[in-house]
Amino acid sequence: MKALRILSALMVLVQLAACSTLSVQSDYDPDYDFSRLKTWSWVPNAQPSQDVRINNDLMRRRIERAIEQVLAARGYRRIDKGTPDFQVNWFGAIDRKIRYETINHFYGGIGYGPYYGAYWPAYSHTYPVEYEQGTLIIDVLDGKTHKLVWRGTGSDYVTEHKDPAELDKGIREAVEKILANFPPRREKKTVDQQPEPASR
């Protein structure tokens, strides 16, 4: 298998578009009251990445438009003036990684008895495969304290996508999956029943 490589700047984070192998996780402050959140704004002057494949006008617009659309669909309202209930920021990264794959080579043929038509391992070969992984992080900060209260992360392989419309759709789907856990769902706490007073 050949190593996966990026062929142009518009291929950034694009396997996030497929979403079939997108790995998503989230973390949050369990003591924070997410139910009061109604309005939001972007963290001002934030730099999403030092990588120009991510930190460019085309990619920033795609990701920010997707985040805005998903939050609006959830009923959150973006404001440009005043103090919002929460702020949103995002980061992107592309990391070069190596995984190891093993191929078993088999001998086989016609035999007799229990080995009739059987195949058995001859030798194994393990080799490194180089690939690139794209990661998108979405942060939610309290609007007054500016402290991080929720973080969602999505990671996947980076592959080639040449169609801008396909890229838009893929990023939207990735953002939807990442924000699916926002706000976090809390399990309802059961109230312990009070013991009945002893009869006199």
Image (cartoon, rainbow, N blue to C red):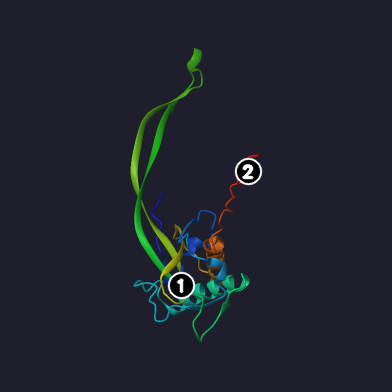
Q: Is residue 45 above or below residue 92?
A: below
* Mark found first going from the N terminus, 1 or 2: 1
In the visual, does 127 lie left or right of 22? left
Q: Tell me residue 2's x, y (percent).
A: 39, 52
Q: Which residue is mark 2?
A: 197
Secondary structure at numbered mark 1:
strand
Q: Tell me residue 64's x, y (percent).
A: 50, 75
Res. 93 mark: none
In the visual, does 155 lie left or right of 37? left
Q: Which residue is mark 1?
A: 142
The answer to whether one can see residue 166 in this image is no
Give yes or no for contact between labels 1 and 2 (Cβ–Cβ under 8 Å).
no
Which callout, 1 or 2, points to the residue nearer the camera?
Answer: 2
Q: Tell me residue 20's x, y (percent).
A: 54, 54
Label 1: how many residues lie within 10 Å, few (<14), some (14-19) or many (20+)? some
* Amino acid residing under circle 1: Asp
User: 121 or 165: which is nearer to us?
Assistant: 165
Q: Residue furthest front?
A: 200
**Mark 1–mark 2 distance (CA, rounded to whole Å):** 45 Å
User: 187 or 49: which is nearer to us?
Assistant: 187
Q: Tell me residue 162's x, y (percent).
A: 51, 68
Q: Is residue 173 above or below residue 127?
A: below
In the visual, does 130 lie left or right of 37? left
The answer to whether one can see residue 186 in this image is yes
Q: Residue at x 56, y 71 (%)?
A: 36
* Amino acid residing under circle 2: Pro
